[in-house]
Structure formats: structure tokens, C-alpha cells
Image (spheres, helix red, strand yellow):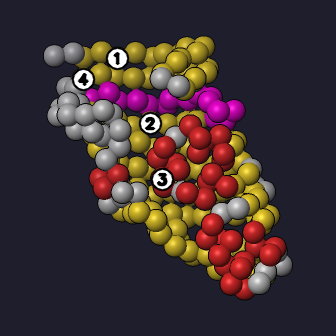
Amino acid sequence: NVDLAAHASLGKVLYENLVFENVKGSVRLKDQVLDMSGLTFTMLNGAVTMSGQYGTANPSRPQFAYNLTLGGFDIQQTAKTFDTVRTLAPISERAKGTFATELSVTGSMDEKNQPIYSTINGRGKLTTASVSIANFEPLNKIADALHMGDFKDIPIPRAVIQFAIKNGRVSVDPFDATLQGTSARISGSSGLD
């Protein structure tokens, strides 16, 4: 049995292909649970604040529960770095701009420490300042059907998007936006599995 508590302040941490800088916070390892609190760091030119737990009582299916706040993240860089983001929000690969988000999420990992999408549940808010979306196939199809070529490259002003994740399915609450001078109410869902 291990019972270890520490307050850390690290200049740089390397984990696989990720670089975390200015890492500060408290961690405790007890009863096969890593408990993180007040953890802050920078990565991908953005800032992260998080708390949560990662438990390995069942090593082949670790459990996690995180509360995250991210700010100033580049959308495409985030999509390129995290498979889960590309799966969760395929539009992210075609979006240019930055975002901030608040997310509470729970789920399980497989034996290779990859998320088991059908176990992911949570709720969050995504905020963007100025984003543009180009060459996203669903928007291209809408543009073609409506004979509105402007919809193939859309600037989107500030948006605040509430979303939920239930059993690996992401649902976006309806929100209003103006797309190329056209008012729109946007909502939808996407499966993670």
C-alpha cells in the first residue's frame, strides 16, 4: 500500500508526444487512486487548470474523473494532438481559431490507456472568439444543396456552446449564430464510438 502526497512545481514535463510547462499542483496517490488538485500548466500555447482522479483498482480498466478548464487553445493544433478531439468533434480539423472550455468528464480507459468511448460521460461549455470553418464536408453539402457557395468557408463570430456527453455520444445544446449573414440555430450530436 502506497500513501504518497506531494506538491509539485515543475518547469517542463514530457509525456509521450506532449510537453507540459510550468506544472504546479498537488497530487496524492493512495489506494490505487491518483488524486490531483489545483493542477495548472501550459501546453499547446494554452493554459490548463484541472483537478480529478485516475484510479487503477482494475489495472486493465482504469477509471477517471476530471474537471478541466482550458484557455487559449488553437483548435487545429488541439485536433492534431488529441485523437479524442478529432473523434468528438470532427469539425475541429477544419476550424481555424482559438477556444476555451470548461469540462467535467468521467470514463474508463482500456489496457493501452486509451479512452473507452462508450464509458465517457460529462458536461461542458466551449467558447470561441473568432473561428472560421472551411472545407467541412457536411457544410459543403449544405452549400451545394442551397446553391450558397459562401457556406463552404464560414467565419463564425464569438460562440458559447453548451454540450453533454452521455455514454460516448456528444450532444450540442441549441445555440444561435449568424453564418454569412444568415441566422441559424445549431444543435446536433455525434457518437464517440
**Answer yes or no: do the residues labelled 4 and 2 have beta carbons within 8 Å?**
no
Q: Is residue 58 left or right of residue 86?
A: left
Indicate which disc, 1 or 2, sits on the residue closer to the N terminus.
1
Indicate which disc, 4 or 3, sits on the residue closer to the N terminus.
4
Answer with the quarter of the image where residue 191 lies: bottom left
Question: Main SS type for the magenta part?
Answer: strand
Answer with the quarter of the image where residue 108 lies: top left
Name above or below for residue 28 compared with residue 123.
above
Separation of marks 4 and 2 at Cα, in angstroms: 16 Å
Q: Position of residue 6 (x, y in %)?
A: 40, 15
**Answer yes or no: do the residues labelled 4 and 3 have beta carbons within 8 Å?**
no
* Magenta stretch bounds: 33-47
Separation of marks 3 and 2 at Cα, in angstroms: 24 Å
Number of other residues with Cα within 10 Å of mark 1, as a class: few under 14, some 14 to 19, many 20 or more:
some
Mark on residue 5? Answer: 1
Q: Nearer the viewer, residue 114 or 11?
A: 114
Residue at image position (54%, 57%) is 89
- Say which of marks 3 and 2 sits in front: 3
Residue wearing tag 4? 30
**Answer yes or no: do the residues labelled 1 and 4 have beta carbons within 8 Å?**
yes
Camera sees residue 47: yes
Name above or below for residue 47 compared with residue 93.
above
Residue 34 part of the magenta segment: yes
Residue wearing tag 3? 87
Q: Is residue 156 left or right of residue 90?
A: right
Q: Nearer the viewer, residue 60 or 90?
A: 90
Label 1 secondary element: strand
Label 2 secondary element: strand
Task: Kindly identify the amino acid type of the residue bearing the numbered disc 4.
Answer: Lys
Mark on residue 51? Answer: 2
